[in-house]
Image (cartoon, grey):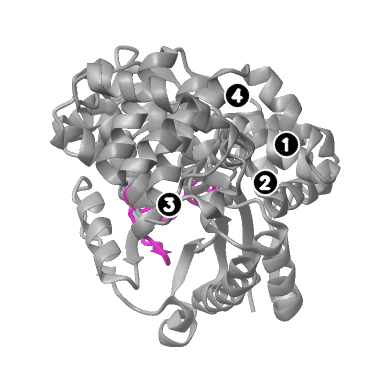
Amino acid sequence: MSERRGDTRPNAARPNAARQNAARPNVVQPARRVAYEVIAAVRESDAYANLLLPTRIQRAALNTADAALATELTYGTLRMQGFYDRVIAEAAGRPVTAIDPAILDVLRLGAHQLLATRVATHAAVNESVELARQVGSRSATGFTNGVLRAIARVSADEWRERILADTTSPDDAIAALYSHPVWVVRAFRQSLRQEGREGELEELLAADNAAPRVNMVALPGLAEATAELGDANAFSPTGFVLAGGDPHHLMKDSQGRLRVQDEGSQLAALALSRARPIVEGERWLDLCAGPGGKAALLAAEALNGGATLVANEVVPARAQLVRAALAAVPADVPVWEMDGTWVGEDQPEVFDRILLDAPCTGLGALRRRPEARWRKQPKDVAELSDLQSALIHAALGALKPGGILAYVTCSPHIAETRGIVATARKAWGDKIAPMDTAAVLQGLAVQPLDLAGDPGSVQLWPHRHGTDAMFITLLERQPD
């Protein structure tokens, strides 16, 4: 631990902190402990909060109220981390890079409680100080107490005004206020501009910082979305919004035929399976199937229509997840573990329909995976674009003449979406043609979708549709 003491404004509160620390027990509420552990694991080992948090909640045997608190503290802190770091830097009188990482996690968690929840100030500060004592040095407790008390003395609205006053550009101001990296703000603006909807940028960023609803899918022909389970989806005909309770118990009780799946993911899979009537005997491929949610939906659709599905996932651990998801469907669905960029050569002109849910930055799922906004960098887009281009070329090679490819990403970044499709169309020329993807989606949606831009592609949005920002393009390989 590096030296944390110094003549900074927050340290004036240390004498009071010492008396308070002596008077209270050395206990941290289980919900706060769980939230801290998940936030620390995200930083230390690139853990995914949405995967780790349920496990930690279960291990700690949290009751419903504490589980809800742990969830709010974890996701709220991760979403607003960029804003909180600016607040902490000003309150501490030093950049956050000069603060021990473990103590910075404590401060972020405390800042969220002080500025965005109804947690009592004394509880937020005292338990944060105790956390600091457990994960840092003795001097860290006084530092933590001083910084958090300095934050607590200023209202959330005044902190926003202070932080905005220190920004360096309009983009930096928006990035600070909505806690997104500047490069992500610019990428979102560019994508909205393609639709003539640039004015929706702040609404989109605000939606990224709101807790999403729990969407479920009922595998068609195998499960039913009843009113008792929740409200029907706004758009997808195969799902519902969970009314309450633990979705994992529902998944277990239904043997996986009811499962958590974002409505946008449901629409992406259904765009392929319902683009036109299924002809019995069709062969389908889910090229990048992990972790298996869309594969399970496609398998049910194929079973109902007399088609067969093959799933492919190059990463063995993710391939096991695909097999587990497919176990809910009473059909023989082989799961390959091949490099998808070779499928065009290994399986030329074999499949009638192919789903390419391409590996991407995941910028469309920042509501569910808030840490991704801090983990991804612009260079990741370029690296992934090369892979996406190779995969779409391979998928088109594996498609039969007359077959349909659904190119899908959970990212609205133009370089991962329209740019990849444009490059593929240029390379393949008149051998492929775009379908009216917008018309397909409108035809299967329960209610009309507010879509904009080129009808050959559909971009879903959290603020407009309540879904992840899924991009969907349907391409048809032309008969020889």
Q: Which residue is mark 3?
A: 101
Question: Which amino acid lies under the numbered mark 1 shown in the image of this protein?
Answer: Leu
Magenta residue check for 283? yes
Q: Is residue 1 left or right of residue 205?
A: left
Tag shown at residue 447: 4
Can you tell which of label 4 and label 2 is closer to the viewer?
2
Q: Is residue 295 above or below residue 359?
A: above
In which quadrant is the C terminus drawn?
bottom right
Query: Up-down: is 178 above or below 276?
Result: above
Reading the image, the residue beneath label 1 is: 451
Quadrant where the N terminus sits is bottom left
Q: Residue at x 36, y 61 (%)?
A: 281
**Image quadrant in which you'd find residue 320:** bottom left
Camera-nearest label, 3 or 2: 3
Closer to the chain start, of discs 1 and 3, is 3
Q: Mark 2 and mark 1: span between their CA atoms?
A: 7 Å
Locate residue 85, reporting x and y percent: 57, 41
Mark 4 packing: few (<14 Cα in 10 Å), some, or many (20+)? few
